[in-house]
Every structure is written in structure tokens, then in C-alpha cells.
Image: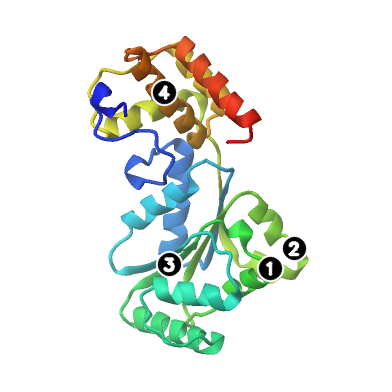
């Protein structure tokens, strides 16, 4: 609605996990480095956690785009599956042709695929997002898959991505074997206060903006206070602020506009709509 008014190619503050908008904050750089290290050194199991809206899924998509083409990948979202369904999803996402519905045969085909890729010199990465939703039995299945190895290296690198509840799940006594196999961990923190203005500018620049929109210092302070540095919340308030600026016919987002947006969002929150 407002893109033409501001001269934007697309909306800069969508809450979708678009890697084109990925912002390399200090913490996200560290997280990305941990992922690359864990995969390149074939560490087996890697755990990446962060609060809701801190950019975990976007980071994973950006990471996948950075990997060499000789690294085979599978990305599983919202894994609310049975053990068999999880195996089916993994096999399908790796592009393994399979007509079998049996767990044993699915594991055999995955094992054959991993050995073939290893002989070719390829690495294989499985990323499971929202892994805090995995029941203990599914996490144990993941551990067994990570055990597929040669005498020298792991054939499957598994990245478990989730909210902090994932750590609580991994601390269960029945999952102690899996916990001991986690070789790389990283927890993503929200953006630091000093980086929020840079984050907003970055997303505007990605959409092709060359000047024309100004967020006042007071507006940035308000956004920082509202969001506590959480990217998804920054996107929510900034998207609404651009809409309000468009309605008011101004390209300057000041404290008054931000305050009005806060009131609207708070009314939605009270009504249970966000």
C-alpha cells in the first residue's frame, strides 16, 4: 500500500524469514560462525537457540545459501511428526527417491545416501527448526541418525534450532546420550541498542530506498524500548509506522507516529489479536 509513496520495491519490514534481509549483527555473525565451524569440521550435532523473533530461521536460510553446492542439505520446519513421518520428511527433503513407509527401510536408504555422498567427498547437513517441539522419542531418533559415521568422521551434521525450551528438553535424563553428543552450541541474543538504527536502515536499503524516509532519534528510542532489540517486534512497529506515515502524508517517522502505533498494537494485544 505504501511502497509507491516511499519509492520502495517491496515492504521492508515483513516478518517472513527472507534471507535477502538478513542483518549481520555481532551476535548473528557469531552464530553464523558457529554453524560454519560445526558443519565444516563435521561435529555431528549443533544446537542453536534464541527467543521468539530473534531471527533464527532467517539465519538458517542465509546459512544454507552460503554453503557450497557440494554440501547436501535438508531443512525441516515445524517438526510435529511421528518418528516415521520425520524420517519420511528427511529422506524426501534430501531428494532421496523412496516408496517405502517402513522405518527400517527409510534409515537404510538414508544410510546408503550418506555413504555415497561421503565417497564423493560431500558433506550432508540436516537442519531441524522449531526443535523444541520434538518429543524425546524424536530427539532420540535424531541421535541415532547422527551416529552414522565412518572411522574418521560424522556423515550427517544435524543442526537443532529452537527456542530456549530446547535446552530444557535436552537436559532430560532420558536424553543424556544426545546431550553428550552436542559439540557446538550458540544462543542468539536480541540486537544491541546501538544496532537498531542500523538494522532499520539496512532493511530499507535492501528494498532500494535511497533517502526519503527518516526515523527520528526519539522514534528509534521508542522502537528500542518497545522491542528490546527483537527483530520481529522491530519489524512489526516499523511496518505500522510506515503505514501511519503514508496516511499522514509524511516521510518522517517521529515520536508521535511511533506512539500512535504503540497504542494500536497494545489495543490488539489486549484484544488477543497479537
Measured as percent of width and height from the top left, residue 37 is found at 44, 57
Q: Nearer the viewer, residue 75 or 177?
A: 75
Q: Which residue is mark 1?
A: 136
At horizontal 50% and vertical 32% (from top left) the residue drawn is: 191
Q: CA distance from mark 4 to mark 3?
A: 34 Å
In the image, is residue 266 above or below residue 254? below
Q: Give me the C-alpha separation between circle 1 and circle 2.
A: 8 Å
Q: Are marks 2 and 4 in contact (CB under 8 Å)?
A: no
Mark 1 → mark 4, Cα distance in angstroms: 41 Å
For the residues labelled 2 and 4, the Cα–Cα distance comes to 40 Å
Callout 1–callout 2 Cβ contact below 8 Å:
yes
Label 4 crowd bin: few (<14), some (14–19), many (20+), radius 10 Å: some
> Taking the image as drawn, is residue 139 in sight?
yes
Left or right: 19 as drawn, with respect to 128 = left
Q: Earlier in the sequence, mark 1 or mark 3?
A: 3
The residue carrying mark 3 is 125
Front residue of 178 and 94: 94
Earlier residue among tags 1 and 4 = 1
Task: Determine which residue is flagged by label 2.
Answer: 172
- The spot of residue 157 in percent (x, y) is 47, 68
For mark 1, give the secondary structure: helix
Residue 12 point in image, percent of width and height: 34, 33
User: Which residue is labeled 4 in the image?
Assistant: 197
Amino acid at each position: 500500500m505504501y511502497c509507491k509513496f516511499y519509492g520502495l520495491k517491496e515492504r521492508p519490514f515483513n516478518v517472513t524469514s527472507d534471507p535477502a534481509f538478513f542483518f549481520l549483527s555481532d551476535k548473528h555473525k557469531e552464530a553464523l560462525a558457529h554453524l560454519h565451524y560445526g558443519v565444516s569440521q563435521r561435529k555431528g550435532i549443533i544446537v542453536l537457540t534464541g527467543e521468539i523473533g530473534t531471527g533464527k530461521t532467517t539465519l538458517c536460510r542465509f546459512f544454507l545459501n552460503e554453503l557450497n553446492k557440494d554440501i547436501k542439505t535438508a531443512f525441516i520446519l515445524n517438526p510435529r511428526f511421528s518418528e516415521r513421518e520425520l524420517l519420511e520428511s528427511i529422506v524426501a527433503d534430501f531428494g532421496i527417491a523412496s516408496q517405502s513407509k517402513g522405518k527400517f527401510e527409510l534409515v537404510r536408504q538414508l544410510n546408503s545416501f550418506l555413504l555415497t555422498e561421503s565417497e564423493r567427498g560431500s558433506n550432508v547437513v540436516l537442519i531441524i527448526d522449531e526443535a523444541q517441539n520434538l518429543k524425546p522419542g524424536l530427539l532420540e531418533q535424531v541421535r541415532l541418525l547422527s551416529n552414522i559415521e565412518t572411522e574418521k568422521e560424522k556423515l550427517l551434521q544435524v543442526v537443532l534450532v529452537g527456542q530456549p525450551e530446547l535446552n530444557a528438553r535436552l537436559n532430560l535424563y532420558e536424553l543424556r546420550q544426545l546431550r553428550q553428543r552436542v559439540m557446538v552450541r550458540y544462543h542468539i541474543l536480541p540486537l544491541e541498542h546501538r544496532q537498531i538504527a542500523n538494522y532499520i536502515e539496512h532493511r530499507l536499503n535492501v528494498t532500494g530506498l535511497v533517502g526519503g524516509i527518516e526515523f527520528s532519534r526519539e522514534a528509534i528510542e521508542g522502537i528500542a524500548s518497545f522491542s528490546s532489540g527483537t527483530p520481529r517486534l522491530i519489524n512489526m512497529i516499523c511496518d505500522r509506522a510506515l503505514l501511519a506515515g503514508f496516511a499522514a502524508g509524511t516521510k518522517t517517522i517521529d515520536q508521535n507516529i511511533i506512539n500512535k502505533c504503540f497504542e494500536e498494537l497494545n489495543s490488539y494485544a489486549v484484544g488477543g489479536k497479537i
